[in-house]
Image (tube, rainbow, N blue to C red):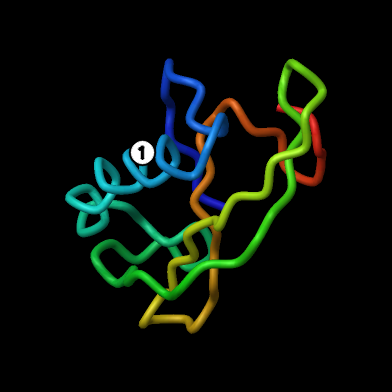
Amino acid sequence: MLYFYTTDNVTQNQEAYNTFIESFIPLLASVPCPKCGMIGLLILYGTHPRNFINEDMVRIELLIQRVHCKGCGSTHIVLPTTVLPYFLHC
């Protein structure tokens, strides 16, 4: 997993998350792979659906961005720091 700090609630809807990802793309070349530590080898690698429950107790499904390391072959997801891994609640 790749975590990026944000002060915005980017899990409120898909549009907010997509804006967050667009701001992440220029940083991709300088981010090390969490598994092998190599810098500059991460590429965008599709999305996968993930469900969240927001502060209003409403379930939201977002397509979460995946990245792939060309060095070690591992795949990671890109999450803002407002999301707890493996939990539904933000």
Looking at the picture, how far across and down is residue 21, in whole percent?
35, 47
- In this picture, residue 34 sits left or right of residue 88: left
Element at label 1: helix
56 or 9: nearer the viewer: 56
54 or 6: nearer the viewer: 54
In the rendered image, the vertical position of residue 53 relative to residue 21, given as above or below = above
In the rendered image, the vertical position of residue 61 relative to residue 7, given as above or below = below
Looking at the picture, how far across and down is residue 89, in whole percent?
79, 29
Q: Residue at x 72, y 25 (%)?
A: 54
Q: Residue at x 47, y 81 (%)?
A: 72
Q: How many marks?
A: 1
Looking at the picture, how far across and down is residue 55, in whole percent?
73, 17
Looking at the picture, how far across and down is residue 60, in whole percent?
69, 41
Q: Residue at x 38, y 46 (%)?
A: 18
Q: Amino acid at mark 1?
A: Phe
Residue placed under numbered mark 1 in the picture: 20
Q: Residues within 10 Å of mark 1 (few under 14, many from 20)?
A: many
| Quadrant into which the C terminus falls | top right
Q: Residue at x 35, y 70 (%)?
A: 44
- In this picture, residue 32 sits left or right of residue 85: left
Could you say which quadrant of the image residue 75 lies in? bottom right
In the rendered image, the vertical position of residue 85 relative to residue 50, given as above or below = above
